[in-house]
Image: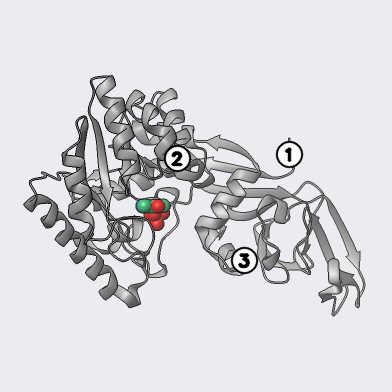
């Protein structure tokens, strides 16, 4: 077995989904975001657990993920965020996937493909309401809608947009203005005769903090995995972290005062210490920025990282913990007994966000699914 291990608690995923469902209006469809291997948690087991819990559909980034879901027996609707115009039209029709459309390229190919097979492809048009990323401007929306209207075999299911700072409670005005622009876009579409029955703009933060953003469909990602999108959202839902990251002690040693620890001598012991060597490093997603800053759990106690985090090794000060021995479990983030180190804490030490850490750790270590 590998020295490091990621445990995925599927019962936590199910619980978090039920929390998302509880926040959504009864008529609001919940489409969990399972892009990037379900944020490092494993696409297939996570999607199967969510389908069992009644997920109304799924949101993925790339075609490969959509096909993987279909081949694993996921039969609910799937929204594909980043279709590749020239390549994906056939599979979109073949596997009944709903792509997000933001330019004319895909429309022609899709129309041809669905007419060939006597089917209708449902699409969402992406409108940029202030994210400053993918999508057409509200000004260009009538042109793309009119273009689609002239094409057989395509049905516009609704519009979609994305919020840029719903996690930031100090900038509520911006999020509310994005929702307002989105409603404007929906009205423009309806005035042109489109029904637009399924419109969506809310990510986890939108779902948790902006009732007006919920509409008919929501796309929660991070909350499904048990991390909060914003620091002040703890009261809105009781989330359970789904990922635990564990390693183990491979050497314990005593060093005298004045000993240099790890590359660059960035820690020199002020007194005699007991050091545990742990085989986790930045190749496993444990960022080098955590050097001299982070903590881990050993024997149900917090213990600080000493010196530079290496590619495959990190040194831990265990002077205050009795009896630390080779093979002791080390929890990098997650729970050990009554102690917890959250992924958000580790992300803070690393100078990043939980999303980044979950993807990195989940994709680089062997994963074990627990509580299916
Ligand atoms: C990743 C993503 C989401 C999910 O965001 P969370 O903050 O993880 O809830 C929703 N919509 C789009 C377009 C995304 O790219």
Q: How far apart are the two marked residues, 2 and 1, measured between alpha carbons?
A: 30 Å
Tell me which residue sits at (78%, 67%) in the image. 308
Which residue was labeled with disc 2? 62
**Residue carrying label 1:** 2
- Mark 1, ligand 1, within 8 Å: the answer is no
Secondary structure under the numbered disc 2 in the rendered image? loop
Question: Could you tell me residue 173's position as x and y percent?
Answer: 26, 75
Pointer 2 or 1: first along the chain:
1
Cβ atoms at labels 1 and 3 below 8 Å apart: no
Q: Say which quarter of the image contains residue 348.
A: bottom right
On the rendered structure, is 251 left or right of 49?
right
Label 3's element?
A: helix
- Residue at which label 3 appears: 350
Counting from the top left corner in percent of width and height, residue 179 is at 22, 63
Report, in whole angstroms, how far the alpha carbon at label 1 lies from the one at label 3.
Answer: 23 Å
- What is the distance, in whole Å, between disc 2 and disc 3 at their CAs? 28 Å
| Residue neighbourhood size for the residue with mark 1, other residues' Cα within 10 Å, grouped as few (<14), some (14–19), many (≥20) | few
Q: Residue at x 91, y 68 (%)?
A: 255
Q: Earlier in the sequence, mark 1 or mark 3?
A: 1
Q: Nearer the viewer, residue 120 or 354?
A: 120
Q: Assess disc 2: are there few (<14), some (14-19) or many (≥20) residues with their C-alpha within 10 Å of its C-alpha.
A: some
């Amino acid at each position: 077995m590998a020295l490091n291990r990621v445990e995925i608690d599927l019962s936590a995923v199910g619980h978090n989904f039920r929390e998302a469902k509880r926040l959504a209006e009864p008529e609001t469809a919940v489409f969990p975001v399972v892009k990037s291997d379900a944020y490092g948690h494993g696409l297939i087991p996570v999607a199967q657990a969510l389908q069992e819990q009644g997920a109304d559909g799924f949101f993925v980034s790339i075609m490969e993920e959509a096909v993987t879901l279909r081949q694993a027996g996921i039969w609910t609707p799937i929204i594909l965020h980043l279709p590749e115009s020239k390549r994906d039209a056939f599979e979109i029709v073949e596997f009944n996937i709903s792509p997000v459309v933001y330019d004319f390229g895909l429309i022609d190919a899709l129309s041809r493909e669905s007419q060939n097979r006597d089917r209708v492809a449902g699409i969402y048009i992406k409108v940029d309401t202030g994210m400053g990323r993918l999508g057409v401007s509200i000004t260009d929306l009538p042109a793309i809608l009119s273009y689609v209207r002239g094409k057989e075999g395509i049905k516009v299911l609704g519009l979609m947009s994305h919020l840029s700072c719903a996690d930031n409670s100090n900038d509520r005005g911006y999020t509310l203005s994005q929702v307002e622009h989105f409603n404007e876009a929906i009205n423009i579409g309806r005035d042109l005769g489109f029904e637009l029955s399924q419109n969506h703009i809310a990510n986890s933060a939108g779902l948790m903090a902006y009732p007006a953003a919920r509409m008919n469909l929501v796309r929660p990602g991070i909350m499904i995995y048990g991390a909060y999108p914003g620091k002040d959202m703890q009261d809105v839902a009781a989330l359970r972290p789904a990922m635990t990251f564990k390693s183990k002690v491979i050497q314990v040693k005593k060093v005298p005062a004045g000993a240099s620890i790890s590359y660059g001598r960035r820690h020199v012991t002020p007194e005699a210490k007991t050091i545990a060597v742990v085989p986790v490093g930045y190749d496993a997603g444990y960022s080098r920025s955590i050097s001299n800053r982070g903590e881990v759990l050993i024997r149900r106690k917090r213990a600080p990282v000493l010196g530079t985090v290496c590619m495959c090794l990190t040194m831990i000060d265990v002077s205050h913990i009795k009896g630390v021995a080779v093979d002791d479990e080390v929890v990098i983030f997650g729970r050990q007994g009554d102690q917890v180190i959250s992924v958000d804490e580790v992300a803070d030490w690393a100078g990043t966000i939980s999303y980044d850490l979950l993807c990195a750790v989940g994709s680089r270590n062997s994963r074990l699914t627990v509580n299916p």
